[in-house]
Amino acid sequence: MRKLFIHEPLDICHSEAAMFPERHVKLFRNGRNQTVRIPREFELPGKDAIMRKESERLIIEPMPPKSLLAFLATLAPLNERVSADPRLRIRNSSSFDALPARHQ
């Protein structure tokens, strides 16, 4: 079995700024709250967000959808046609007439 030794750490990204774009923003007061205008390129979807503090960093993330239906409503419609496979076709509604009355 051959062992691999790495003598120097691999430097994939030379600066953190290359991975995370930065913008200078102004802080101002809105009543008792401190406010920041979020630049367009950092805009979050929706009307709500989650904010937390990690050490000296303030992190703002979009609010996750509250339900599966809310999540599905955010998806773009598919532009694909449904398969013409005969096994996937909806049966004639008359085939459901054979169900017992309690199941109709």
Image (cartoon, rainbow, N blue to C red):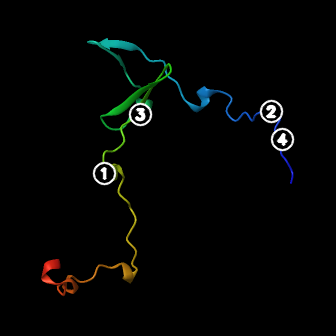
Amino acid type of the residue tagged 3 in the rendering = Glu
Of badges 1 and 3, the one in the foreground is 3
Count of numbered tags? 4
Amino acid type of the residue tagged 4 in the rendering = Phe
Distance in Å between CA atoms under marks 1 and 4: 50 Å
Disc 2, disc 4: CB below 8 Å?
Answer: no
Distance in Å between CA atoms under marks 2 and 3: 35 Å
Give the residue at mark 4: 5
Residue 88 locus on image (x, y percent): 36, 78
Query: Does the rendering let one see residue 63?
Result: yes
Give the residue at mark 2: 8
Distance in Å between CA atoms under marks 2 and 4: 9 Å
Relative to 78, say whether 16 is above or below.
Answer: above
Residue 47 locus on image (x, y percent): 30, 34
Q: Hey, which residue is sitting farthest left in the picture?
A: 101
Residue at point 28% right, 12% down? 32
Q: Secondary structure at mark 1?
A: helix
Q: Secondary structure at mark 4?
A: loop
Q: Residues within 10 Å of mark 2 (few under 14, many from 20)?
A: few
> Mark number for residue 73?
1
Disc 1, disc 4: CB below 8 Å?
Answer: no
Amino acid type of the residue tagged 1 in the rendering = Ala
Relative to 73, say whether 29 is above or below.
Answer: above
Q: Is residue 12 left or right of residue 88?
A: right
> Mark number for residue 61?
3
Q: Quadrant of residue 37?
A: top left
> Mark number for residue 36?
none
